Image (cartoon, helix red, strand yellow):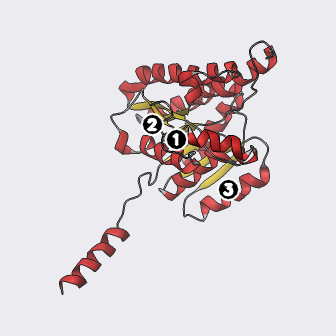
Amino acid sequence: MQLVFIIFDKQLISTTKMKLLEGKTAIITGASRGIGRGIAQVFAQQGAHVAFTYSSSVEAAKELEDELKALGVKAKGYKSNAASFQESQDLAEAVVGEFGSIDILVNNAGITKDNLLMRISEEDFDKVIEVNLKSVFNMTKAVQRTMLKQRKGSIINMSSVVGVKGNAGQTNYAASKAGIIGFSKSVALELGSRNIRSNVIAPGFIETEMTAKLDEDTVKGWREAIPLKRGGTPEDIANACVFLASDMSDYITGQTLNVDGGMLT
């Protein structure tokens, strides 16, 4: 009799498990592949309705939209450039009209144009700052009014270990990602009184379809230099995002969470 009770109790716990983002609406920029796609998938698994942006991959966006809807949440992909102030404003307005609220913003859009300082062009420097840093300003500005009305919101900005410690050959990327950290801390100070939180995730070496194209020996060397002896996955970043997006982190704002396997230890 005791054994039957234990089995039943486990089943009861399993079926009544609460999803951490149940009923919340999230905007995720740059979500058609890589880390952004992983965040969208895990958010949907945790009950969030997902509005995501993509730049050109229409087929990949449609595939992701269908995948998220199959999890029982509302999902829609928007072709939108977060580096454009007006497109960001239009996106936020469209999402509120379609979903009714914006509870979470994940600023994930980003590019690299690496080169040594002596060789980098002004155009490549400006482009990385525009896409990586100005997009964070654009989207945060776009959702601010809605979150202020709601008196609640979680903003999660994707930086990088490179933004924390710098990296040779990436002055533009490092500047953009370090700027995100300073911007996020300032937003946390400005909007904290309205219960709007602003935090940063700084990923380390995350293995995606982009890193799969690299030489295996190079990747192996990077893995060996990480204390946990492996590269991270999009799901590792997504799980950290779930925590910062959920009510479990209600008293956390203005912080940078390094998700790097110990790289900066």
Q: Nearer the viewer, residue 185 or 47?
A: 185
Can you tell which quarter of the image residue 134 is in? top right
Q: Nearer the viewer, residue 88 or 166?
A: 166
- Taking 149 as reference, is 110 left or right? right
Disc 3 and disc 1: Cα gap in Å? Answer: 20 Å
Q: Nearer the viewer, residue 186 or 76?
A: 186
Q: Nearer the viewer, mark 3 or mark 1?
A: 3
Which image quarter is the N terminus in?
bottom left
- Taking 207 as reference, is 229 left or right? left
Vertical side of 256 occupied by 66: above or below: below
The structure residue drawn at horizontal position 60% and vertical position 30%, both measured from the top left corner, is 139
Pointer 1: what residue?
102
Vertical side of 117 occupied by 49: above or below: below
Are circles 2 and 1 on residues that touch, CB within 8 Å?
Answer: yes
The structure residue drawn at horizontal position 67% and vertical position 35%, both measured from the top left corner, is 90
Which image quarter is the C terminus in?
top left
From the top left corner, tell me how far across and down residue 216 is, in percent.
71, 47
Vertical side of 182 occupied by 43: above or below: below
